[in-house]
Image: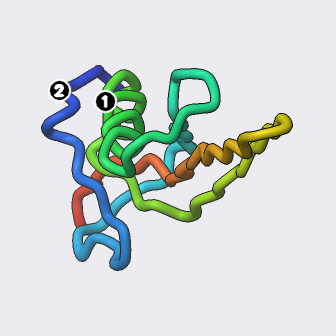
Amino acid sequence: MVGRSPQSVQIFKTNKPTRHYVEVGIVTSRPTGGFSSAQTGDVIAGLREKAAEVGCDAVIITGTRSDVYGAANSTTITVSEKQEFQGMCIVYSEEN
């Protein structure tokens, strides 16, 4: 498989593609910075980039996970969330 442009990688959140495909691996993406929150779009962009590096045509999102972190002192409580997306990396195949 040859790498491709991240913009060419399709993301399927609720439905699977109607074209024939082969599952080739799992990709995950999470925020890159400390304990700060990330926008869902940034995490999905990370999935696209990882899938593009290995040459996948599309990613079918298979799950999400959110980890919540907190800290407190005498006057402040701080809560942060890190969201991770997992997806099946696929390549399209010719119909047999």
Q: Which residue is drawn at 29% across and 56% down?
A: 11
Residue 19 image offset from top left, x and y in percent? 23, 69
Residue 35 appears in the figure: yes
Q: Horizontal placement of 44 versus 61: left or right?
A: left
- Up the image or down, 82 lies above or below 14; here it is above
Q: Mark 1 or mark 2: name the one nearer the start of the chain.
A: 2
Task: Find numbered disc 2 in the image and state the secondary structure of the residue it sits on.
Answer: loop
- Up the image or down, 93 lies above or below 27; here it is below
Give whichever of 13, 70 is nearer the camera.
70
What residue does disc 2 label? 5
Q: Residue at x 44, y 40 (%)?
A: 38
Q: Horizontal placement of 80 versus 59: left or right?
A: right
Q: Tell me whether the residue at label 1 lies in contact with that at label 2, contact meaning CB atoms closer than 8 angstroms.
A: yes
Q: Horizontal placement of 71 versus 5: left or right?
A: right
Quadrant of image for the C terminus: bottom left
Q: Residue at x 67, y 47 (%)?
A: 79
What residue does disc 1 label? 52
* Residue 74 falls in image quadrant: top right
**Callout 2 crowding tier (Cα within 10 Å): few <14, some 14–19, many ≥20:** some
